[in-house]
Image (spheres, rainbow, N blue to C red):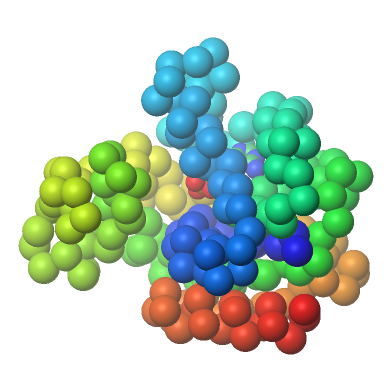
Amino acid sequence: MNIILLGPPGAGKGTVAGNIKSELGIMHLSTGDLLRSEIKKGTELGKQAKELIDQGKLVPDEVIIGMVSALIAQSGEQGIMFDGFPRTVAQAEALGKIAEIDAVVLLDADEDVVTERICSRRICPGCGAVYNTALLNGSNVCEACNTELTSRADDNEATARERFQVYMQNTQPLVDFYEKADVLCRIDANRTSGEVAENVLKALKDIK
Ligand code: AMP
């Protein structure tokens, strides 16, 4: 089963994927995580991507499509949950040529809700765990590995609002694209992460 998680930045795509991937037994492919790993390794691709990511802009389609195509080719028979990809119609068309998509889950959330979530997101540089300051009770260390938490460089209000505009302009058209293909289901992502994950699983069970 191949699934796309669609929705604005901060809608909770990564959190939902983390919560349900083992239940579904499929691989989680986050283009944002892949790019951040290139930045960490200091590769040429990482250097180019960092500048765009820090401004809230999209990395060029050909770079992203090349990166994802290589991973799909290596994934064998295992299903994939795409998170943060596709983000443009050109990416969706390229994906359609190399993989069959069974369901597209739109995590629908308001600009103010996602901006607030992004600004209060903290990440663990040690193990990658993601937290919200509202649930940390003033602590700033990872519960799993005790590493001091940090924020992503693009997780500030100005960049979050820019990313939302970029989403509306480039990615929102995919809602129509996948609605026409009759694979779209909408989930209210203004709710808690637990409720959202539960509703996504319910929606996917109906599709299977
Ligand atoms: P994310 O972790 O999904 O919020 O992605 C962080 C940033 O990585 C985005 O704001 C973009 O700059 C870049 N990015 C991630 N996925 C894509 C994609 N499919 N197409 C273009 N840029 C991407």
Judge from the rendering whether residue 84 lies leftward or rightward of residue 41; answer left or right: right
Q: Is any atom of residue 104 visible in this view?
A: yes
Q: Nearer the viewer, residue 204 or 89?
A: 204
Q: Report the quarter where the C terminus lies.
A: bottom right
Q: Quadrant of ligand 1?
A: top right
Residue at position x 12%, y 53% in the image: 140
Judge from the rendering whether residue 188 lies leftward or rightward of residue 154; answer left or right: right
Residue at position x 28%, y 59% in the image: 131
Q: Report the quarter where the N terminus lies.
A: bottom right
Judge from the rendering whether residue 177 lies leftward or rightward of residue 22; answer left or right: right
Q: Position of residue 106 (x, y in %)?
A: 65, 70
Q: How many discs mark residues in the rendered view?
A: 0
Judged from this view, the residue extending furthest toward the left is: 138
Residue at position x 26%, y 40% in the image: 126
Looking at the picture, does residue 159 appear above or below residue 208? above
Q: Position of residue 206 (x, y in %)?
A: 74, 86
Q: Nearer the viewer, residue 171 or 181?
A: 181
Judge from the rendering whether residue 106 lies leftward or rightward of residue 13; answer left or right: right
Q: Nearer the viewer, residue 192 or 170?
A: 192
Looking at the picture, does residue 108 appear above or below residue 43? below
Residue at position x 36%, y 63% in the image: 117
Q: Position of residue 101 (x, y in %)?
A: 81, 60
Q: Position of residue 109 (x, y in %)?
A: 52, 72
Judged from this view, the residue extending furthest toward the top is: 44
- Quarter of the view holding residue 133: bottom left
- Quarter of the view holding residue 58: top right
Q: Is any atom of residue 172 visible in this view?
A: no
